[in-house]
Image (spheres, grey):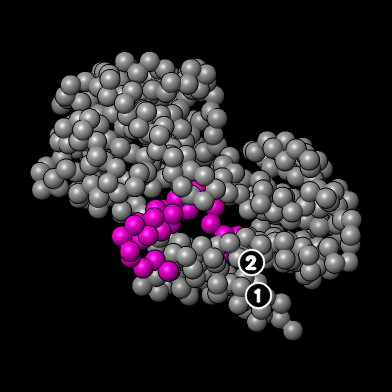
Amino acid sequence: MYQPTIGFAGMSHLGINSAVATAERGFHVVCFDMDKTLIENFKKQCLPIVEPTLPELLTKHCLTEKIEFSDDAAMLGQCDVVYIASDVPTNDRGVSDLASIYALIKQVLAHLNPNALLVVLCQVPPGFTRALKTELPLERVYYQVETLIFGRAIERALYPERFIIGCADPAISIDSRYGSLLAAFECPILPMRYESAELSKISINCCLVASISVANMLSEICEKIGANWAEIVPALKLDKRIGANAYLAPGLGIAGGNLERDLETILNFSEFYGTEAGIVKSWLRNSQYRKDWVLKILQSHVLLTNKNPTIAVLGLAYKENTHSTKNSPSLLLLQYLRSYNVRVYDPVVDCSIVSWAHSATSVEQALKSADVLIIMTPWPVFRTMTLEELKKTMRGRVIIDPYQVLAFLGLEKEGFHYSALGVGVTC
């Protein structure tokens, strides 16, 4: 049986993870990016991003020649299906800049095989894919919803829950070349019109934001009344109307860029069409309010009594298992701490991005004589800290741990003032 060759244009986080997962499913993959240095690094299996299991799979398929890299777009001419797979850049408000995506599509179309299919994989606003009819017959154009998650990208790319596919006419069967690729992942395939597929991705993220906002609101009440949100979550996850995989962990506002982009898209549509989107504005207010949680705790428990504390901040990435610092709560916090003696450490992110702070080379170095420890990213390595290490290394006894990385140590009983999201102090 004929097996199509698959191309990926744009070797950003989305592109490389999707390409490696496709090679793992048995297809020959051609990867293009105009950045020559990036391509040379990929050929050497040198990755600019952090994702569990990605390095091993990349090396595996480079050695078997299942995957090849080129900075020459003409290489895509051998492909039956070509994905536009570059991440869409956004600003701090979540506004997308589509100029680079248009430029990439134009570059790909100049070399696309006359019978090949184009699949837009990167996230674009509703209406984007159908507008490509001026460039290519729509029967050769598809939109595929991506649902990768930083830190779990390969897992999500290899084992998707379903494929949401935007088509010119969902009543017509998907092209067999593209269909055979989708079938290899053994999950449900949901064809729909372009606009529905594009809005599906936004709809998914809106539901996630709703869950996060509920968790943030109620976890703050827990902090005030002496309840513990972590004790409540199992009850919610056993409710079939909410479910085992619900997003119920409280956080320091929305970060990462993808959720913010979709909320901005909804607000733009609401303003243009005159629809009501007050709930989205409420989510954004809740997110902004929750971003200040650590600073409020720090001010009330440290800065009011100690005017010159030594502060250890562990974690710069916006969450664990990723190098991304897009809208990172840690970087936001650090903007307010410039006048203090601050040590920062992250196992992946280059700490020199906070040029004014002291860059520690280890957890122990960051903790040395610290008056307060703040854990801003729940990296697994931070969970290996021991009570003895904290007592021996720190000078002070204040720990601010939003994500309960050290909750298992029972720090309150050992004389520490311990603060975590959703955890109240009982009288």
Circle number at residue 119? none
Depicted 31 relative to depicted 212: above or below: above
Quote the CA–CA distance across marks 1 and 2.
7 Å
Quadrant assignment, res 167:
top left
The residue positioned 44% from the left and 44% from the top of the image is 96
Pointer 1 with pointer 2, Cβ within 8 A: yes
Q: Earlier in the sequence, mark 1 or mark 2?
A: 1
Image quadrant containing the C terminus: bottom right
Outermost residue toward the bottom in this view: 427
Q: Which residue is mark 2?
A: 421
Residue type at tag 2: Leu
Instruction: Residue 368 in the image: state x and y as whole percent.
Output: 86, 48
Depicted 7 relative to depicted 230: above or below: above
Depicted 131 relative to depicted 220: above or below: above
Does residue 324 appear in the picture of this structure?
yes
Q: Is residue 394 left or right of residue 98?
A: right
Determine the secondary structure under disc 2: loop
Tag count: 2
Q: Nearer the viewer, residue 76 or 407?
A: 76
Determine the secondary structure under disc 1: helix
Question: What segment is highlighted magenta in the picture?
Answer: 249-278
Q: Is residue 187 left or right of residue 392?
A: left
Residue type at tag 1: Glu
The residue positioned 72% from the left and 35% from the top of the image is 352
Q: Which residue is mark 1?
A: 223
Instruction: Residue 1 in the image: state x and y as whole percent.
Output: 15, 26
Q: Magenta segment: does it hold 265?
A: yes
Neighbours of disc 2 within 10 Å: few (<14), some (14-19), many (20+): many
Instruction: Residue 325 in the image: state x and y as whole percent.
Output: 59, 44
